[in-house]
Image (spheres, helix red, strand yellow):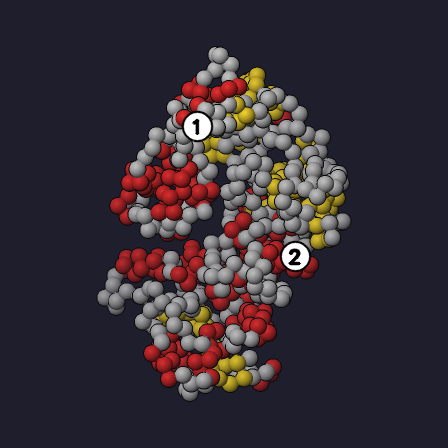
Amino acid sequence: MRLLCAKTQKLVEFFGDAIPPYAILSHTWEAEEITFQDITQGHSYRESKKGWSKVIKCCQQAIEDNFEFVWIDTCCIDKSSSAELQEAINSMFKWYEMSLECYVYISDWTYPSVNAGPQEIQKALRKYARSRWFTRGWTLQELLAPQSVRFFDSLWLEFGDKVSLREQIATATGISQKVLVDSVIDARRAMDFISIAQRMSWASNRTTTREEDIAYCLLGIFDVNMPLLYGEGHKAFQRLQEEIIKKSDDQSILAWGFCRHDRFLWRVSTALAQSPLDFLDCGEMVSRGAAAPGDGFSMSQRGLRLDLPVYGDFDDGDIVYCVLNCTLAAKGTKGVTTRLLAVPLARCTSRADGAKPKPDEYYRLCNRIPHWVEENEIAASKRMTIYIASFHRHGDLVRPRLNCRLAFKSPPPDYFIAGMFPPERSLNSLLHLTLCNQLDTSFLIVHMASNLQLPGYLVVVKCRLNSSQDDPVTPDSLSQEDSISDILDSNKHVPLPLNSSEVREKIIESFAVQLRLDKSKINSTTTIRELNFDSLSAIAIHCEIEERLDIDFDEDILFRSKTIQDVENKFRFAMRSHSRNSPMLQKGQIKIPLREIDSPQFAIVEVAPDASCQKIYR
C-alpha cells in the first residue's frame, strides 16, 4: 500500500503489518486532479493545478489529527499499471475500512455562516444531501467502510460525521440509520444482515464515469473479488452477480424488476439484472434463506438453475411464477400474513440458433413485474427445476403477443384499482394492460376496490385475436366501405405539427403539474435527475404529456433522456407523422399494420370488500 507523507507530500510504500495508522480522503473527481506522476516526478506545475489545494488541505487536517500519512486515490495509485489498478480496486474497501479517519470533502456545498438560524441550517443540510458526492458509485463504500467518517464543506470546514448526520445521509442514500450507526463498529457485520437486493438498491441512483465501474465499485459491498475487464460494458455487472451467487444463497438477488421501464413487445431478459437500477424499489427487501431443504439456485453451463417452488401454472405451464423466499420488512409485521415475492417466467418456444428448446428452459419477463403471494397459499406448491439463459440470444422468441391498452381516466368515485390478474403494472388513474395467449382467446380481470368498505367489483375482459392481425393494409387492399380516414381516425392519435417552443412548453407544464413544481424553475437544461421522480410519478407524467401533446409514446423516453431538451428532441422526432392526406399514404407506399381485438366480451361481478381477484380466479 502506497501512502502520502502529510508533511513532505512524498509517497512511501508499506506492506502487511508495517502499514502505519493513516487518514483517508473521500471526494469526487474533478478537473486537474493531482496524479501519481505529478507526485513522483515532482512536476513544478502541480501546484498550479486545481487539485493541489485539496491535497494540501487533506494533509493539513491529517497533521492536525496527529497522522503522519494519508491516502488519496488520485495520487497514491499508479493508474498506468493495469496490475496495480486491479489490486487497488479489489482492495479499496479494505483500505477505507483500515483507515482511522475518513475525510469527506463536499466540493459543491458550503455550510451556512455562524449567524445562520436553525431553519436556515436545516434548509442547507437538505441541499447538502443533494450534493454530487451522494450520486457517485465509488463513494458508497467510502461512506460505509470506515469507522470514522467526518464531513467537510467546500471551505474545508468540518460540519458533522456519519453518526451526527445519519438522518440526512439516510434520506440521501436510502441506507437505514441503523446500518450507518452499526457500520461505525463493524461495516461488514452491519451489512451481513442486509439482503443483496437492499444493498443493490443503495447503488440504484448512483453513476460512474465508466460503465464497468458501476460493478467494480460494489466489490467491497458484497465482499467479492474479480478481475477487471474494461471494455466489457454491462457484462461486468452480470459477472459481479455471478460471483455473488457463488458464495451466497440469498434469493433476493433475483428480486429485481420493480422499476423496469421496458415497454417493448413481449420483452424477455436473462436471469440477472442489467444494472443496480433494476433494484431501485428493493430498499426494504428481506431475504429469509431457503424455504425448504433442496431449494436453491446456481450458475451452470445452461444458465441459471433454479430449484424453487412455483406458483400458478398458466397457459399449460408456458407462464409460471417462481416464488422467492423474500418479503418486505413492512409486510412481515405482527398480525399480517407474510407475503412472498413471485417473479414471472415464460417458457422458451423457439431459439435463434434453430435448436429446439427444452421444456425446462424459461426466460424472465421484463414487462411483467413480480408480485406478492400469500405464504400459506404456496405451502402445497410444486417445486420445479428451471433453467434461465445466462445471456440473451438475439432473435429468441417466447410466444406471440397481442397488445392493447386500457386507460381509466376517471375511476369511479371512492374506488381505486386494487389489482389485476394476470398481474401487470397499474396506477389508479392509468392502467397499462397487455393481453396475451398462444391460443385465440385472451382474458383479464381488473379488481376495483374501495377504502370505504364498499363492495368491490371485478371487471372481466375476454377477447379473441383477429385472425388477420398481421396482414398489413394499404389503400389498394381496402374494401369500398373502408377509407384511409376511417383507419386514421381520432383515436389513432395522428398529432398536428407543433413547433419547438410549444412542445417544450407542454412538456415543462406536464412535469410541473405532476411533480407540483414551479414551472419557472424548469427549463431546457434541467436534468431528469434533478427532478427526482420515481416510477409511479413517471407514469403520471407520461399520461399528462400524452394528453397535452395528443400522442402515444413509449415512457422510456423519460428515462433515456438526460435533460428536458433531450425529452423535447425525442418527442419532436416521435411526432413526425404523415398527414391523413399524405401522397405517400394514398399511393400505397406506407403500410399500416392492423392489430385488432375481435369479439370482446365484458362482465362486471360484485364481490366482498376484502375479496382478492387472484383467489376468485383460482
Query: Can you identify the residue that label 2 sits on?
Result: 242
Residue 473, x across and y down, in percent: 52, 23
Neighbor class of circle 1 (other Cα within 10 Å; few <14, some 14-19, many 20+) is few
Which corner quadrant holds the N terminus? bottom right
Residue positioned 36% across, 43% down in the render: 568
**What amino acid type is highlighted by mark number 2?**
Glu
Left of 576 or right of it: where is 443?
right
As drawn, which residue projects farthest toward the bottom? 8
Identify residue for label 1. 584
- Residues 202 and 299: in front is 299
Q: Residue at x 38, y 47 (%)?
A: 566
As drawn, the residue found furthest toward the left would be: 115
How far apart are the alpha carbons under marks 2 and 1?
A: 52 Å
Residue at the image position 49 percent from the left and 64 percent from the top: 138
**Which of these two is toward me, 246 or 10?**
10
Horizontal and vertical percent for residue 543?
A: 41, 34
Picture quarter with the C terminus: top right
Q: Secondary structure at mark 2?
A: helix
